Amino acid sequence: QVQLVESGGGSVQAGGSLRLSCVVSGYTGNIHLMGWLRQLLGKEREGVAYIYPDDGSTYYTDSVTGRFTISVDDAKTTLSLQMNNLEPEDTAVYYCAAETRIARKTSARRLGLSYSDFTWWGQGTQVTVSS
């Protein structure tokens, strides 16, 4: 079992910054993919930034490249998303997620940011950016 609890959401003006954190508890040894996804009202959830803890490789959706940075500690107990130069279009509910199923390791790598069938999810945190 893995539990994820997010914090750090809030309201900010365009151009501002926020840092989201996701505390991970339980057995983290099998986590091979972690990510931040977001969902706007009435739209599908989309991958924003992913990290593969085993080799540290990171992936970002085009709209946040250069503005957001994903990171995780060596123990995989804290996943973070530093968001700079925020835009109104970044307004959404942000979720952290983790994947532990070994059978999904290859397909998750292949799908990249399109992979959304994570096993473990946080409760979500609202980010609102005003113009």
Image (cartoon, helix red, strand yellow):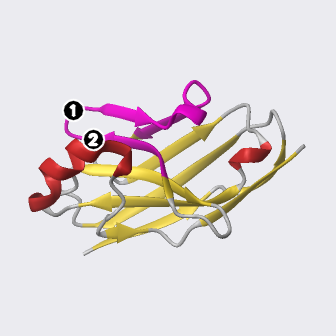
Q: Is residue 110 left or right of residue 81?
A: left
Q: Where does residue 78 sit, x and y in percent of width and height?
A: 42, 51
Residue at the location (34% across, 41% down)?
Answer: 51
Outermost residue on the top side: it is 66
The quadrant of the image that shows the N terminus is: bottom left
Q: Which label was assigned to residue 55?
A: 1
Total marks drawn? 2
**Alpha-carbon span between mark 1 and mark 2:** 6 Å
What range of the chain is rendered magenta?
47-71
User: In the structure shown, which secondary structural element does the residue marked by tag 1 occupy?
Assistant: loop
Q: Which label was assigned to residue 92?
A: none
Q: Quadrant of residue 125?
A: bottom right
Q: Where does residue 95 sit, x and y in percent of width and height?
A: 51, 61
The quadrant of the image that shows the C terminus is: top right
Is residue 43 visible to us here? Answer: yes
Residue at the location (36% across, 59% down)?
Answer: 116
Residue labelled with disc 2: 52
Outermost residue on the front side: it is 43
Q: Where does residue 19 sit, x and y in percent of width and height?
A: 63, 44
User: In the structure shown, which secondary structural element does the residue marked by tag 2 occupy?
Assistant: strand
Q: Where does residue 12 sit, x and y in percent of width and height?
A: 82, 47
**Amino acid type, label 1:** Asp
Q: Is residue 114 left or right of residue 17?
A: left
Q: Residues within 10 Å of mark 1 (few under 14, many from 20)?
A: few
Outermost residue on the left side: it is 103
Looking at the image, which is closer to me, 20 or 41?
Answer: 41
Is residue 73 visible to us here? Answer: no
Answer whether labels 1 and 2 touch (C-beta < 8 Å). Answer: yes
Q: Is residue 80 left or right of residue 35?
A: right
Decide: is 3 above or below 88.
below
Decide: is 103 above or below 21.
below
**Amino acid type, label 2:** Tyr
